[in-house]
Image (tube, helix red, strand yellow):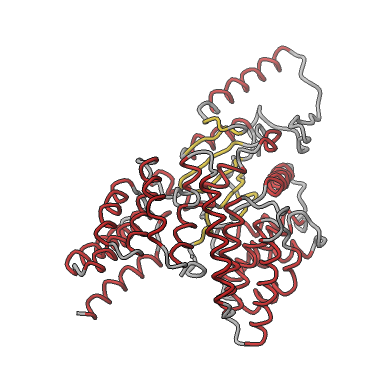
Amino acid sequence: MLSVTLPAILASVAIAAGCRPSSSPTDESGATNPANPAPTASKHVSDSETAAATEDSACAGPVERAPLAWFEDDYDAALKCAEQSGRPLFIDEWAPWCHTCISMQEHILTDKALAPLAKRFVWLAIDTDKEVNAAAVEQFPPQVWPTFYVVAPTDESVQARSLGAASVKQLRTFLQSAERTFLDSAADRLAADDPLALLRDGDRAIAGGDAGAAASHYRAALNKTEADWDRRPDVLVALISALYRTDAYDACAALAEEELAHTGKSASAADFAYYASICASNLDDQDRMGKLRQVLETHMDTLVNDEAAPLSADDRGDAMRIWRTILIAMGQEDKARQVAERQRTFLDQAAAEADNAFAAMTYNWPRAEVYDYLGIPAQLISDLQASVKALPNEYDPAYRLAWIYLQAKQPDKALPMAEQALKLVYGPRKANVQRLIANIYNAQGNRDAERAAREAVIEIYRNLPVGQQRPAGLAQAEAALVAMDKDQ
């Protein structure tokens, strides 16, 4: 699924000279299809060897996480490697608090099916909360977490973008189409009305902040393709999210009514329903609202219960959460609680079967949310304590434990955990931890400490670099401080 900064469900790339690749995409084995025979003149051989040496030097340093090798938090180094090698740059924008990001890194981006693509891209992972990445985040803003970009190295232009979770097959399809977009664009043979060109233009528009133009491009791309286009599900997610961002609720609902059956069985099917449910809640026509919610509820029921659906454990758990919220909106509280109980059991098992403590951290927040919904937050305390102990240098386990303590009405135990998290956290997430501390002080009745903590939240937001600024978060923090004054 995707992690978002929307107040909803969880009230929730000319190629470098000397390194030019073939003008045709590589085959499934990963081998290129050269248009010209290998050079035979000694000068050409020398030039080739020089280019190879330059590329080797520029591309030294990635961390091997089979089958891919990743630059980590070093956009300039990754871009230089991409430019020297003539490969497109793939960017994984993630954050340690994002359970979908961790799931993608642990289960999808390590899948051996990606091996044929390993040498066809330069791979970069950037923690969007780290200040060193602020400029890259500003240039390629994440709409949700994770957001994936494919970028041309010479002009740093967006070639493709993908939102949230994806199956292995979906990710391979995305990468192959992004590679074609990159190569055909570089060769100046991508027609303006090619669906991939329209999709690229939509991705560029949304990265530039123009959701309305993006929606037009995405819709045009869909209109140029058949209903079974392999990119249709993820493009539908891009379109419906763009409509949501422009408050085009009627058009958003209409898209859901027309295209829900074409969203597939991957995480895109749930992500699409997520946005559709929000749009449904903003319709004036109550009858239409009810009918759309019923269709969405049936859609989520079918998806969750399809054991063959290519969903990671995190995806399936998140689908249950989305299903539950739709049921709540429909007033079906009893069935929502049944889904929540099923979600809790499923996530508990997924955490217990995780390969390592970091992978298990994927489920800390989804479990905390559903335990709290069920009114049993204290029952998760021991598991979160174990996560804190196993991952002492990660801020998120301590943060989640502090939150659970607070929900369990144990603010005195919550405070030291929140303070531990505050020592480790960085970037925009620091404001979240500081806000939690303010809420803990509120629960303790310590108004002076609460005020100081809320003032600290505002200062954190005000001092963030441009690429990491959160205007909505700042506004909320300022409003919370004003509310304190009114309560006096």
Percent x, y for residue 470?
A: 40, 61
Residue in the picture at 18% in, 67% down? 446
Image coords of residue 148 (percent x, y): 58, 49
Residue 229 placement, left or right of 88: right
Q: Quadrant of the C terminus?
A: bottom left
Q: Is residue 40 above or below residue 73?
A: above
- The residue most toward the left is 448
Task: Tell me: 258 left or right of 166.
Answer: right
Q: Position of residue 149 (x, y in %)?
A: 59, 48
Q: Where is 423 relative to 439, above or below?
A: above
- Tell me which residue sits at (37%, 45%) in the image: 388
Residue 294 placement: quadrant: bottom right
Q: Residue at x 38, y 51 (%)?
A: 382
Q: Tell me the residue at 60%/83% (across/down).
A: 283
- Classify the position of the N terminus by image quarter: bottom right
Classify 426 as above or below 30: below
Residue 401's spot in the image, x, y percent?
Answer: 36, 54
Horizontal side of 323 relative to 364 (left or right) equals right
Of the pair 351 and 280, the residue shown nearer to us: 351
Q: Nearer the viewer, residue 140 or 343?
A: 343
Q: Residue placed farthest to the top in the image? A: 42
User: Is 476 situated above or below 14?
Assistant: below
Count the labels in the image: 0
